[in-house]
Each structure stands twice: as C-alpha cells, then as structure tokens.
Amino acid sequence: MNPVFDLILHAGTVIDPMTNRHEVCDIAIADGRIKAIAPTLDPALARENTDVSGKIVTAGMIDTHGHIYEHVTGRFGLNPDLVGVYSGVTTIIDQGGPSCMTIGGFRNFIAAPARTRVLAFLSAYLVGGLEGHLYPELYGPAQTNVAHSVRAARENADLVRGVKGHAELGGVSRWGLDVMRIGKQIAREAGIPLYIHLGQLWPTAEDNPDIDADELVRELLPIMEEGDVLAHPFTRHPGGFISVETGEVHPVIWAALERGVTVDVGHGSHFSFDMARKVMDAGIVPYTLGADMHGYNVKVPSATDTADRKLNPFAGVAPFNLTHAMSKLLYLGMPLDQVLATVTANPARMIRMEDTLGSLQVGREADISVLTLHKGHFGMIDNSGVSVTASEMITPDFCLRAGVRYDATSPLVPPLDLQAA
C-alpha cells in the first residue's frame, strides 16, 4: 500500500472548542493540510506516524498579545519564533509594535522570515512600540495620524487585524482620552477592532497628578463597540476592571460586555490572582488569552543590578509563557475546554479569521498544537508576588505549522517546576 498521508497523529485527545469535539482520535496530514480525522486510521496510510496518546491535540494556538518587533522596539521585542512555534504557538499577534510608519519593516523583516504566522494590531501612535514605557511623551494625540494609519491598515489587511491603544492614568493626566478617540476613529474607518490596554503604566504628570481612575473607566467604555477588546482585566494597577471606590467590578464594564466588547487576558506584568478572583467571581469570563511576553518581563536582573531596575519597571517578574498563563486560568476554575477556546476558536473570531484558523477541520491548513496536562504540585506566582500551588500545569510538546513540525525547545518556556504542596 502506498502512503497517502505525510503524517498521522495517533490517539491524541482532540479538543476543538469551535466544533465541540472532545474525543480520542487520529489526525492525518498531507501537503500541509488536515486530510482526515477519525477514531482510528491505518498507520500504513502514512509515511510517518507519531503517537500522541495521553496528549492534548488542539488547533494551533493563537497568542493574542505578543511583542515581537525584534531589534526595532528596543528591549521590548522578542524573537517571534521563540515566542511562537518553538513555544507550541502557531500564530502570534504583535500588539502595537508596528505603526503606520514602520509596518513595512515589520512585514519584511519580522513576518516574512518567521516560521510562525505573524499578525499585528497596528499602533495608534506614529512611533509604535518604541519602549513607550520609558517615553510617555511619544504617545500623545499630536503623535498620531488618522489618514496614514487607516491607509496602512487597509494596504496591509493580511497582517493588520486591529488597532492598539493605551487608556491609563499617566497618559490621561497629560492628554485626556483624546488618543483613545483617535484610535477608535482609525479602527472604525479601517473596519477592524480596537484593543485597549487598561491599568496604569506611566507616572501621572506633575501638573495633573490627581486623576480619578474610576472616572477614566467610565469615560472610556462608551467609546468601545462590538468586537473591540479590553485587555488586562486582572491588573492590580488602578484604572482596571475593579473600581477603586467600591472594590467591585465597574458597572460600565458590564454594559460594554453586553454590547459585544470582549475581554483579553494580556498576562504580562499585569496578572494578579486577587484581582482575577474578584473579576471571575463576579461572573466575567475571559474570552481570549495573550501571554504579553516582552523583553522586560523575561529578563530577570540580579538584585545588585540597580541601574537596570531603575530603567526597567518590570524587573524581577517571574518568567511565564502562554501555556503557563493557561495553567493559571485552570487554577482559577475555568474548565479545560474553555481555556483552550481562549487560544484557539475565540481569538480566531476576534481577528475575523475563524474560517481559516482556530479549529481542526478537514481541508484546513495543518496548524496544530500538542500539549501535555501534568498532574502534581506546581508553583505559580503573579506580578504582586503572590504565589500559589496548582494541581495542574500545561506545557507545550510541539506544534505543526502548515504541517511542518517544531518542537517546543524555546528557552522562553518555563521549566516544569515541581513543588511540594
């Protein structure tokens, strides 16, 4: 019998939230596409067979919040393939790295050579993600251009799937919410969603230090429409989902969610277990999940490196990746299938690519992530220093990107840290 498939993945637990599939079965791949999904397939039909029994097999994971404009965004930008395919992630969305001025470089020097599928949310600011945490003066309304940004988004529609902006106290103390209104105008005219960072980044302006964090949220939310995205729901910094005045979820958050605004866990340096419990206990379930890895939060300087600590507001944060963030959602009580939806079906819908990404279906490109769900005692820490011990931890084994295998060998994948409970 002549083989008709290049590869069969045998006996994995296939979980596809988009099609409600959760069963043990085989997947056959040929010419970079999924050719068959069945309870069992004859191994003789394939040139290669890989036993994935006991593993989770899901659609290629989509990281909704990356910073991968390497060498251009200073220390911020990581290598796309180390965050991507070598971490088990087949698609990564850079949040605000490229702007209308720099999208050409992003296309030719980042997206084109990457083995990972690379997309972007265009920065609302002309400078894009040029270490903006250190230079807030670069992020005012005078540093925007609606017409140029709309044109860049339309001309690069295969890459640009949204617009990124920041609604936080430091910026609002300088310019109010004018930049957010400009970002919304860009998104509306380009026909793509607006993705908004919540939670303070910069110190407030010396001449306007007393910004009301709750009022910021109340003014921001009416700007947002169906399909727009609120990021960092679990931030401990003021100006997030939790009201400073009441300690509860802002009522305007509920109104936005009812309009079709969605919630993205941009993990990064904005994840607090305490805030996550408050938000999720109130009934808000994250829709998508981005790791928000960047050059600040993966570098851990020594305690004596005081100069770097002064420059780097995220120094000392424990390393994490997308599967580590998924494990935190498991710990917080989200069912496994729902967690997997945050990195497959839901982000595909968010970027309006659900016809091609986020699901395991015959005929689709073979973007597949293979994961292990470990049982034991695993230590996890948040940005405020709170540590917990979880009973489950997800790690990546390998992925297929258009049928090509990449093992999860990235140094950015945290080692499995077994700790006694």
Image (spheres, rainbow, N blue to C red):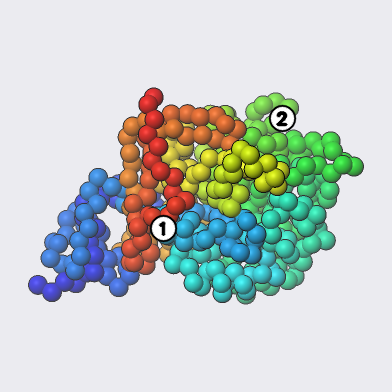
Residue at point 52%, 61% (across, down): 79
In percent of width and height, residue 373 lies at 33, 41
Eye-nearest disc, 2 or 1:
1
Query: Which three-letter amino acid code belongs to the residue tagged 2?
Result: Val
> Rounded to the nearest whole Å, what is the CA distance between mark 2 and mark 1?
40 Å
Relative depth, front residue between 86 and 37 = 86
* Numbered label attached to residue 86: 1
Q: Is residue 113 above or below residue 357?
A: below
Query: Which three-letter amino acid code belongs to the residue tagged 1?
Result: Tyr
Q: Is residue 6 above or below residue 176?
A: below
In percent of width and height, residue 219 lies at 76, 43
Relative depth, front residue between 4 and 39 = 4
> Where is residue 313, by image quadrant?
top right
Q: Quadrant of the C terminus?
A: top left
Residue that carries the numbered disc 2 in the rendered image: 244
In percent of width and height, residue 414 lies at 44, 45
Question: Is 210 left, or right, of 116 in this rendering?
Answer: right
Q: Is residue 388 above or below residue 60?
A: above
Query: Is residue 12 something one can see in this rendering?
Result: yes
Badge 2 local density, few (<14 within 10 Å), some, or many (20+)?
Answer: some
